[in-house]
Amino acid sequence: MELVKIEALLEKYFEAETSVKEEQQLKQFFSADEVPAHLEVYRPMFSYTVVESKIKDQHPYQILYKRRLSPWMKMAASITLIVSIGIFAKQYQQRKQAQYAYEQTVMALQLISSNFDKAKNSIAYLEVFEDTTKKIYKK
Amino acid sequence: MNSTEFSNTVVCLQDKLFRIAKRLLVSAEEAQDASQEVLSKLWEKRAELKALRSIEAYAITMTKNYCLDRLKLKEASNLRLVHSNYESTSDTIQKTLEHRDQLDVVGEYLKTLPAQQQLLFQLREVEGMEYDEIETILDMKPTAIRVSLSRLRKQLRAQLLKINSYGIS
């Protein structure tokens, strides 16, 4: 672009009367390797904005989804829950029954053994009787 | 709005929002937090986005408000720290003056400006946005924007001329 035009644009620029497009032209002009010496002062103003516009956020944003179950999944989950509770309850009941049967058996056996002990004690008297009869017969 | 639409209309603004946040908050980490926060808020509101006139202006305004809140919080929690920050920037101006790294001079000079002017610079000079968009985001009248921008450009020029004359002598 012609130098006169650039100088005119610069004048407009400092009065804030340039359009975005014209400011883009200025940026482009000052991005060149060679800039007339008397305009070199302005270079940092424009190259700074070009450098700054290229900065990027190093951590790309990730959308965070809140997990939502589909209706089918919900149904499957509740069925599984009910079935497992059912199985557990049944097992528990069976175990309770087994425990009860065991306790009944133990009680019955204890009854038998206590009666057995009583019988044994009675037999002890028989032994005493035998001893005494022997003593008598010896004499 | 589904996730593909959201990616195409909102997530593609991420770098821009990040740059705007970085202009105000300076630290890249804080700017990252800002852009993530704004995007997740927009994702939550995705159902309402289609009714907006400009999603971009809305997103930038949200970013602006987020950053201004952050700055206010910092200022309230430690006034002295802000003050020392300010001093350190003028220190670096001195340093860069010696190094004659003029891009840094521009950056450091901008840091001394109020948030509104920094945003104006960012939106117009860096992002190349039209005045009517800037009006809605910054809530400024067209004439006020032009006056402010013209003054900003001239101040920046004066700063560069000053440093350049130091460099020559």
Image: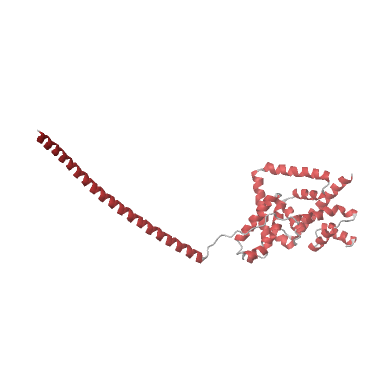
Q: Quadrant of the N terminus of chain A?
A: bottom right
Residue placed most toward the observer, B12 or B22: B12
Name the residue rendered at 81%, 54% in the picture: A45
Q: Work out whether residue B138 can be spotted.
A: no
The furthest residue to the top: A139
* Image position, residue A104 (x, y; %): 28, 52
| Whole-percent x, y for residue B97 in the image | 82, 45
Q: Eyeballing the image, is A106 above or below B4? A: above
Report whether A85 appears left or right of B45: left
Q: Quadrant of residue A124?
A: top left
Determine whether A115 is above or below A27 in the image. above
> Which quadrant does the C terminus of chain A fall into?
top left
Which residue does the image show at 48% across and 64% down from the upper left? A76
In this picture the colour scheme is secondary structure
- Foreground of the two, A121 or B132: A121
Q: Would you place residue A58 above or below residue A71 in this image?
A: above
Q: Could you say where residue B90 lies in the image, as x and y percent from the top left?
A: 77, 44
The number of callouts visible is: 0
> Which residue of the protein is positioned furthest toward the front in this rendering?
A138
Q: State left or right for residue B18 relative to residue A137.
A: right
Residue shown at the point (22%, 44%) measured from the top left: A117
Give coordinates of residue A131: x percent, y percent.
14, 37
Q: Is residue A95 left or right of residue B146?
A: left
Give whichever of A136, B88 is nearer the camera: A136
Residue B13 sits in quarter:
bottom right
Residue B28 visible in this rendered orientation of the protein? yes
